[in-house]
Amino acid sequence: MNKAETFTIMKDMFGKKGSEEQVEGLTLIIDGKLKEVFDTIIAKSDDYNNYTDVLSSVIVHGINEIIGNIQ
């Protein structure tokens, strides 16, 4: 698989406001094939206006699919 067909997720730890607890933060780099797919979804659907809208839906639907498969 070449680099254009992959995506990158970066992880960092952040302090939770008002607490000493550390929480994991993730940054997703939208590029290559993933960017093409997201751009197509945004262009063809009135439900999605930006990458954040698409990713939120992908996460919710993906989690629902995973939960449905493990129950």
Image (cartoon, rainbow, N blue to C red):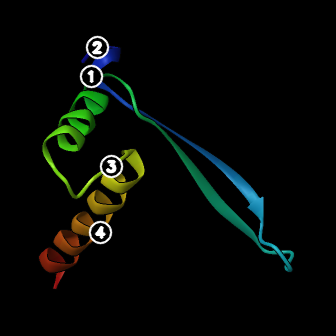
Residue 69 left/right relative to 55: left
| Helix, strand or loop at mark 4 | helix
Q: Which numbered disc flags the more N-terminal residue, 3 or 4?
A: 3
User: The disc labelled 4 sits on which kind of residue?
Assistant: Val
Task: Look at mark 4 in the image and give the residue it sits on.
Answer: 60
User: Disc 3 and disc 4: Cα gap in Å?
Assistant: 17 Å
User: Disc 2 and disc 4: Cα gap in Å?
Assistant: 28 Å
Which residue is found at the position 16% from the left and 86% from the top? 71
- Mark 4 burial class by Cα count in 10 Å: few <14, some 14-19, many 20+: few
* Whether label 2 touches label 1, CB < 8 Å: yes
| Helix, strand or loop at mark 3 | loop
Vertical comparison of 63 with 4: above or below: below
User: Disc 4 and disc 1: Cα gap in Å?
Assistant: 23 Å
Q: Position of residue 7 (x, y in %)?
A: 38, 31
Task: Look at mark 1 in the image and give the residue it sits on.
Answer: 5
Q: Which numbered disc flags the more N-terminal residue, 2 or 3?
A: 2
Task: Look at mark 3 in the image and give the residue it sits on.
Answer: 49
User: Disc 2 and disc 1: Cα gap in Å?
Assistant: 6 Å
Which residue is found at the position 21% from the left and 70% from the top? 66
User: Of discs 3 and 4, which sits in the foreground?
Assistant: 3
User: The disc labelled 3 sits on which kind of residue?
Assistant: Asn
Q: Nearer the viewer, residue 61 or 44?
A: 44
User: The disc labelled 2 sits on which kind of residue?
Assistant: Asn
Give the position of the N terminus as an image quadrant: top left
